[in-house]
Every structure is written in C-alpha cells, then in structure tokens.
Image (tube, rainbow, N blue to C red):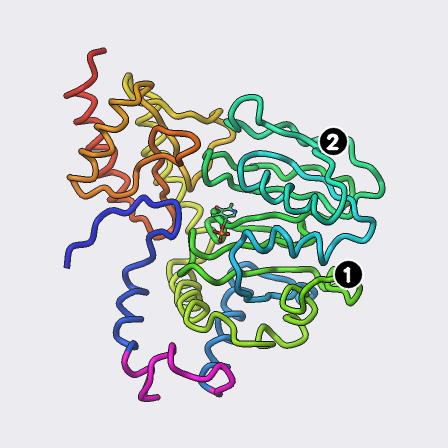
Amino acid sequence: MARVYNFSAGPAVLPEEVLKEAAEEMMDYRGCGMSVMEMSHRSKVYDGIIKEAEQDLRDLMKIPDNYKVLFVQGGASLVFASVPMNLMKNRKAGYIITGQWAKKAAAEAKIYGDVVELASSADKTFSYIPDCSDLDIDDDLDYVYICENNTIYGTKFHTLPNTKGKDLVSDVSSCFLSEPCDVTKYGMLYAGVQKNVGPAGTQVLIIREDLIRDEVLPYTPTMMKYKIHADNESLYNTPPCYGIYICGKVFKWLKDMGGLEEMQRRNKEKAAILYDFLDQSKLFKGTVRPQDRSLMNVPFITGDADLDAKFVAEAKASGFENLKGHRSVGGMRASIYNAMPKEGVQALVNFMDKFEKENGNV
Ligand SMILES: *Cc1c(COP(=O)(O)O)cnc(C)c1O
C-alpha cells in the first residue's frame, strides 16, 4: 500500500485510522452480516449510527440544546438556495463577498430576494478579509451571510463580523471542526463535509431552533425545508447513510485526538511550518495578507507560471499530490486539513526548499 501526501482542497485527505476501520467493517458491520451501505436507514443498527454521530458532534462542538443538527444531501451549493428559501422573511439579506463561494451564494440568494453587498475584497483578488466591525446594516435584513474560510483564496475570518444583532449564517465547509467554535454566535452554520470530515454527499447544518419555521418562501421543495428534516431527525427520506457513518467515525477520531482545542493546536503548528518557510523564501511567496491567513488552505506562487507548473509536476512525481492552485487563481495551493499529518507538511517544505535551491536564480 502506497499512500501519497494528498493536498487536495476537496474531496480531501481523511484519517488513515478511519479508512482502515471502515475497510474492516466493509463486508460485515459488527456482526450484522452486511455493509452499512446495504442496510436500511430505518434499521435499529443504523439508528444507532446516526444518533451516535450526532451526539459525538454535539459533544465536540458543545452545541447548545436549542440548536438542531441536520444531516442532508445536495452539496454546499444547494444550501446556497435553501438558506434564502428558509430564512428570508423580508426577502432581503446581507452578504459579505470574500471569494467565489460567497459570490455564488449571493447570486443564488438574488433569485429569491434582495441581496445587499455589505463588504467585499474583490478589489485585491480576495487576498484579504474586509473590515466588518462597523457595517452599514439595514434593520430589515433577514440575516448576514459569510463564507468563513475561503477555500480557493486561503483567507479566514479570524474575527466574525459585527452583525448588529442580525443572525449570522456561515459556510464553514473548509474549516469545519478545525478549531473550537462558539455555536451561539451563529443563527446557522453549515458545511459540506468533503473538505475536512467525510466523503462528498453529506452536509451538516447546525441551526438555531427558532429559525426553523413553517413559513418558508413559496415553491420551496419539501426536501429543502429545514423543518421537514428537523421534525424527522434527518430521516425524512433516505439520508446519505454511508457518508454519515464515515463522518461519525471522524467525529470519534477527533474526540480521541483530544477534541477541537487539540486540533487547533496541531493545525496552528502545521500551518506555521509552511507559512514560516514562505515568509523567508526568496522563490515562493504566500498570496494572502498575513493576519487573514487560513490554517487550512495555503495558496502560494513563484511569480512565474512556467516555474509554478514545473514545481507542481516535480512535486507530483515525488508523491505530493494536488498542489495545483484553483483554476481561477493559478499558482499552488496546499490544503492541510485535520487529517494531513505534520510530517506531510514538513516533507512538503523540505521539497520546496530543495526545489528553491535547484531553481531559484535569486
Ligand atoms: C467546496 C466548497 C463549496 C461547494 O461545495 P459543493 O459541496 O461542491 O457544493 C462551498 N463552500 C465552500 C467554502 C467550499 O469550500
């Protein structure tokens, strides 16, 4: 078995312990004589799996009782639509535009109501987080929306915006469970799990109960009503059963590692290895304003597209996969999620150092 160091932005690296355990349980889940993939979502065994996954997530994030946890299908991109459908009352919401995912979420919300752009960092290719301490927030906004960690550009809100009492809705797909999180600061937060937690196809939504309402926008499909999923404990129809099972294993793995404080310590340590290297390198440089840097996604460039391509190709040949930057930004991006070991980041930095010595005519 040869595992590479996988720096993919998503779907992304998962803990080896989890993959091995899933492999062991593939043919016969704990004496059931079948795989979790093959079992009824109404069975007692599966009920145990989904309930335990939810409880472990609640323990990890210390989710208060007045927040519901929903496991749903459809990709984070479908949540771009379900947010306005469920949360718009005045049909007006504020969006902070810090990258493509926020832009897409705002574009989707425009189908259903007025979108007020409260702040944007488009002027400098989304390389920073705008000051959101004193935004011009109208009284009739239904919510304020952010993408908390910008997977493509490598920026992160280290301070949440001052929403002046409006409910904050946050896409945390690429920083989910990477550090402690105070759920009470949000009306709703959600993640597509394929960035940091599990296989694509499952979304985790955490919503304050009073935001789960009967009166949603007209023509909202049943499957997109938060109330339907909440009332049926994520079992209104067939949920993404196998994905939830893997997420549950990752939640247990995170607990075993020491929880989110410990993950934050590890993630800071890993990111520092890479950022410290970038800050002293004469060939490579980071593209993000230092105080807004993400711990999860680290974009960098040499400033020469041909050299970037050479680096990506040589890195691949040496077992460092998926380092090419997003097609909209170019350069390189190393995604160093929870499951990327420190040794992987150190090995990448050693490789970059070697590449710099061989190619840096500086
Ligand atoms: C990947 C990503 C999305 C889109 O996820 P899909 O599940 O492919 O729809 C949305 N938001 C963020 C922050 C992401 O990283």
Point out residue 122 in the picture as x, y percentages from the top left corner. Answer: 57, 26
Q: Quadrant of residue 280?
A: top left
Q: Is residue 38 above or below residue 152?
A: below
Q: Relative to the observer, which residue lies in front, 107 or 351?
A: 107
Point out residue 40 in the picture as x, y percentages from the top left corner. Answer: 46, 84
- In magenta segment, residue 345: no
What amino acid is found at the position of numbered circle 1 in the picture? Pro
Tell me the magenta residue range.
Answer: 27-44
Q: Is residue 84 above or below residue 309?
A: below
Indicate the quadrant containing the C terminus: top left, top right, bottom left or bottom right: top left
Using the image, tell me which numbered label, if any, was put on residue 135: 2
Q: Is residue 279 above or below residue 351?
A: above
Marks 1/2: CA distance?
30 Å
The residue labelled by disc 1 is 218
Q: Please give the name of the residue rendered at 28% of the width and 19% of the height, measured from the top-left corner.
A: 283
Indicate the quadrant containing the N terminus: top left, top right, bottom left or bottom right: bottom left
Left or right: where 76 falls relative to 108: left
Secondary structure found at label 1: loop
Nearer the observer, disc 1 or disc 2?
Answer: 1
Point out residue 137 in the picture as x, y percentages from the top left corner. Answer: 78, 35
Q: Please give the name of the residue rendered at 71% of the width and 37% of the height, measured from the top-left corner.
A: 162
- In magenta segment, residue 40: yes
What amino acid is found at the position of numbered circle 2 in the picture? Leu
Give the main secondary structure of the magenta stretch: loop
Q: Relative to the observer, which residue lies in front, 138 or 165?
A: 138
Q: Quadrant of residue 218?
A: bottom right
Secondary structure found at label 2: loop
Q: Are marks 1 and 2 in contact (CB under 8 Å)?
A: no
Q: Please give the name of the residue rendered at 34% of the width and 52% of the height, measured from the top-left corner.
A: 339
